[in-house]
Each structure stands twice: as C-alpha cells, then as structure tokens.
Amino acid sequence: MAVEPAARAAAAASPDRRPASELLARVGWALLAIGIPGLVVAAVLAPAAAGAATRQDWPPFVLVTGLLLLGLVAREDGLFDAAGGLMAGAAAGGRSLFAGAALLVAVVTAVLNLDTAVAFLTPVLVVAARRRATAEAPFLYLAVLLANGASLLLPGSNLTNLIVLGHLHQSGGAFAADMALPWVAAVVTVTAVVGVAHHRGLAHAGRRRRQVTRPRLGAGLAGVAVAVVAVVALPPSGAAVVVVVAGVAGAGWGLGRRRLSADHVRQAVDLRILGGLFAVAVALGTLGRVWHGPAHLLDHASSVGSAVVGAVAGVVVNNLPAASLLAARPAAHAHALLVGLDLGPNLAVTGALSAVLWLQVGRAAGAAPSARRYSALGVVVVPVSMAAALAALAIGH
C-alpha cells in the first residue's frame, strides 16, 4: 500500500483550515505593524546602529527563507512522508515509534532549521501515530518541544544561533563542535520528559502494516545536501546566499514541473511574518547598540545567568528579537546565552515562531494543540534541558 502524504491526510482530517491560516495572518500583520514603525524610528534616530543591526540580522532571515523552500521541495518529493512511513512500519510498539520520531525531528531540525521541522514533520508524526493506533499527543508535543531543543547544533538550525554567531566569527563546523554535547543533552532530556509525561499513551500500539514508500530522490535531496555543506563550511552570510539560491532554484523547478503551486510557496514562506520579525529584530538590535543596559547585564552574569536572561527575554519578546537585542554587543557567555534563547521558548508559545507554526499545522492535521499544555510540559522541559545542556557545555569547554 502506498504511503498517503501526510499533508493530504491532514487536509482530510481538517476540512476547514481557515482559522489556523488566519492565526498566522494576524501574527504577520501584527509584527509588521510593530516592526515597520520601529525600524523607521531606528533608522532616523540612529542610522549607524541600525545599519550595523541590519548587517547582523539579514543572514539568518535569508537563510531560513532558503531552508523553508528546500523543506517544501523535500516534502513534495515525499522525503518526510517516506521517513514517517518507514518509522511507523519498523517500530515494534509505541515507545520505539516515539524514539524513532525523536531521532527524525532531531536530525531534520539540525539540518533544515526548527521552523522547517515543525512545519513539515508535525503532520507526519501525527499521521504515523494514527497508523499505529497509538496516542498522538506525545508525537504532537514532541514535534515542537524537541524542534526547539534540537536547534543548538548548527548555525542554521535556529535563527538565533546566526544572530549571536555574528560576533563569534566562528565557522559552522567549529560551532557544531562546541555545541555537539549540549545538543545531545538537550535532545535526550526533552525526549525523556515528554515520553515520561505521556508514558501511558505510549504503552500500546496497533500491529504493523506493510507500507511501500516511493520518495523522489531529486531536487529535494540535492538541496538538503547543498544546505548542509554550505552551513557547515561557509560563514553565515555566504551560507545564507548559497542556501537561498538553492531554495529558489528548487522551488522554481517544482513550479515549472507543476509539483508546486504559488500558494504552496506563499504558505511555506510567509513574508509578513519573516519581514515583521526582521523589522522588530533590527529595531531592537539598534536599541541594544545605543543602550548599554542589556550588555551591562550580560557582562555581569554567569553562564547560568546568561541562559536565564536569554530564556526570559525570549518568552517576553520572542527569541529572534531578543537575540538581536542581547547580542547587539559581544556576550561574555555567548554559547550559554544561546542555550537560553533556543530552549527557553519551550516555556510559552510566545517564545518562538516555531510554536505559532505548530499551532497552525497541528490544527490543520486534525489534532488539538494546546498552548496551556505546551506550557505545562515546558515548565519541566525547560529547566531540565537547560541544566543538562549547560552542564554539557561546561564539560566540553
């Protein structure tokens, strides 16, 4: 039996996806309404600082645009559905299916960015759980909580990494070497907490069903390979250019062959949200250059304190603008700051764009994502995963 694409299954499960799309639209317009005036004020009052903030912030946003496009091409090539079908067919039971899902989310997040992982893997995991007649809630929450948790490994895994990395002058390979142990610690602890919280639902699963997967090994796979090499080998600005060119080429190829539509591209890359977040980030990055308060706070904070500041700021103003504000000047404990900025958003859906995407695609898949349940899990996930990642960071250094 051929694997049914998760996107098609999600559409069948949720005949009316307009409320979810309207949520993202409202978020996008709100960000533009806040960001554009802030950007104008910053450019008028402090043009030099605004220029510096723009130079620091543009590579992450260009890079994520390319990664989202490559994720779209990979999904249409059936790569994610093939991985989900293989996972569902190979798992012995609910717990092994959950472990396989964690591995899939961790790898896709590290390679293709957490927003790509959340947008395209959430329906895959939900459908895989349904195929095996096991509880879908563990997979639904794993998709977003682990995507945040697994975003520490590569510069492109999380936009905040690239914003903070601007002052480190560190290659992607060197960054990965520094963050490999914290990444493993975060992946293991987030998976463990979510698994323990839902252990009863994972205790049972239906019988395996024979599944035949037929992914196309073409533009999607080639684009992913290009993205990995670029992010690891090139500086952030160079990687951003290479990846966005690969993403545009892949999407153009899909449009030309009518495997993609303009609506697919617009939904995958919402320019209102990306543009609004970029404007807010530049405005706050300008503020961080003319106001010494954030830099003074981080200069006198320990590594643990830096992580806590990053986590709190991320939840309050979203982790991307928070990163621009806090990394406007070099931070004494930059890697620890990233632990807070990347893992802290698991406390509340306000912390990262990934959570907003998750609410949208989770509802579209016919699931019931809850902001309250997200935070209830996050209250445990965040301190445990941050403690483990900071301990691993200390060991590695």
Image: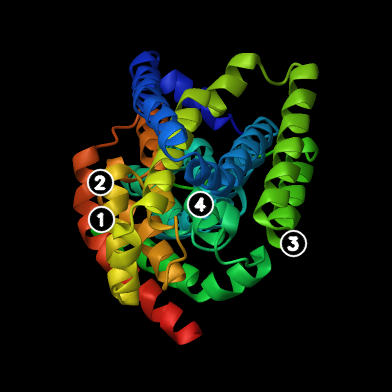
> What residue does disc 1 label?
312
Which of the two discs, 3 and 1, labels the residue nearer the N terminus?
A: 3
Task: State the count of labels.
Answer: 4
Q: Residue at x 24, y 39 (%)?
A: 371
Task: Assess whether mark 1 and mark 3 are in contact (beta carbons under 8 angstroms).
Answer: no
Label at residue 158: 4
The answer to which of marks 2 and 3 sits earlier in the sequence is 3
Residue 242 placement (x, y as % from top left)? 75, 44
Between discs 1 and 4, the one toward the N terminus: 4
- How far across and how far down the image is residue 68, in percent? 60, 36
Residue 103 placement (x, y as % from top left)? 52, 59
Q: Is residue 143 above or below residue 1?
A: below
Q: Which structural element holds mark 2?
A: helix
Q: Is residue 345 above or below residue 216?
A: below
The residue that disc 2 covers is: 316
Alpha carbon separation for disc pair 2 and 3: 34 Å
